[in-house]
Image: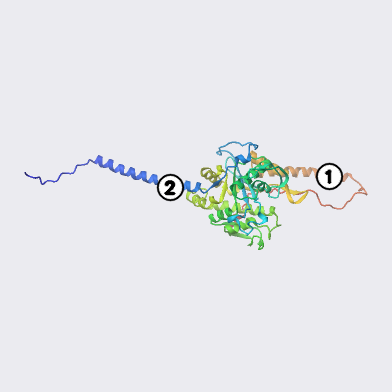
Amino acid sequence: MAVSTHATPRPRHSAKDLSRRTARKLLLAGFSVVLFIVSGIGFAYHDLQSQVNTIDIDDLIGDDRPDKVADDYEGQAVNILILGTDSRAGDNNVDGAEGTEEVAVARSDTTMILHLSADRSRMEVVSIPRDTLVEIPECTTADGGTVGPMSDTQFNAAFANGAGSGNDDAAIAAGVACTIKTVEELTDLYIDEYVVVDFNGLTTMVDALGGVTLYVDEDIDDPEYTGLTLNSGCQHLDGATALQYARVRHGVGDGSDLGRIPRQQNLVSAMIRTAKSKNYFTDADALYSFARSALGTLTTSPGIGSLTTLAGLAQSVGDIGMDQITFITMPNEEAPWDRDRVIPTDEASDVWAAIKADTPVSEALTDTASQEATDSSGADSTDQAQEDESTEPDAGTDQSDTASDEHTPTANATTEDPAAQCY
């Protein structure tokens, strides 16, 4: 039987078949690329989200609160409470004070209300002096007990009332809740979110920014307490030095907490300027790099702890010019019965009213100053008229100059950015 020597011919494919096969390969390749990108984004999101320590404190605050405008932040003003705590536990033991009586109870060493306007055209940051005498409402403690209301009590005792002597999440939650209740009673503002920054958190954030450049307006020499020595002028600070700058009171100014507040505001302003200059608010890669380093050091409310919300607020801040960011210390005056403490003035009420109405704080203070000038002018005219009408002074009247009992309130709202001259 003859055997064919011809090879079996290969089947022929039409150009149409080849085109389909090529298209399938390209589709699979494209799908693989998309899957890789999406999984990478998902991993990055999960990676960042897992860094944030969020604590829900709604149950600790209760329902007796000022009215909240809306749940959705889009098109709404936002009030964020920023708390700097002075815990010395663990990585925060920057001065060897951990476990000492001086820091046995954690307090909110720094308090700022950050207000973002509804149209995101401006931001206002109001510092509340820790030595302000306030009404502290009844608060739930970390162990589930309660601390009764207190009158004429130093503001930063509110955090201690809730936290007790603890430094864990339960203590922080109770401390923040009591502080928010106190702030809301003082201001009649609804606090939407909160952020807690400890010593280690501030150091880490500044280092994640690559340090900050700011303008030091006077020489600082504090070898005994913070160890900080700085000459006036433009200075670039790393995280550790920035923390010293935020804390320093001795060897500069009058040594008071009120004198320290402008330096803290100067540092916050420098951090915002640095983040803007490096596009951390708008560039996804840059923001991821910064957030990866910094988020793990913060404790936040669940709302702002959500990366989508955080990214949206960051974008809002990134769009606001430095000339539209206003820093102010709550208007205050010396307490008549305690020279080491302060009380809010009538101007403070104007500040809170402006924030609640979402109108510029600087305008409210300008209107108040104008009204006071008008009232003063009228009073001076009346006094002069009465003086002109008088003849001989009464023999029993003491004509000597006496110190005035009036206190000069502080109300310095400023958009000035001293660090601008350093660039």
Residue at 55% from the left image edge and 51% from the top image edge:
297
Q: Where does label 1 land, which residue?
A: 383
Q: Disc 2 vs disc 1: Cβ atoms closer than 8 Å?
A: no
Say which mark, if any, is on residue 141.
none
Q: CA distance from mark 2 to mark 1?
A: 76 Å
- Circle 2 or circle 1, nearest the eye: 2
Give residue 26's position: percent from left, percent from top.
32, 44
Q: Amino acid at mark 1?
A: Asp
Give residue 293's position: percent from left, percent from top.
52, 53
- Would residue 208 be seen by someone viewing this image from the given angle? yes
Nearer the N terminus, badge 2 or badge 1?
2
- Would residue 423 be seen by someone viewing this image from the given angle? no
- Front residue of 151/356: it is 151
- Front residue of 185/18: it is 185
Dot 2: element: helix
Q: Amino acid at mark 2?
A: Gly
Quadrant showing the C terminus: bottom right
Give residue 411's position: percent from left, percent from top.
70, 48
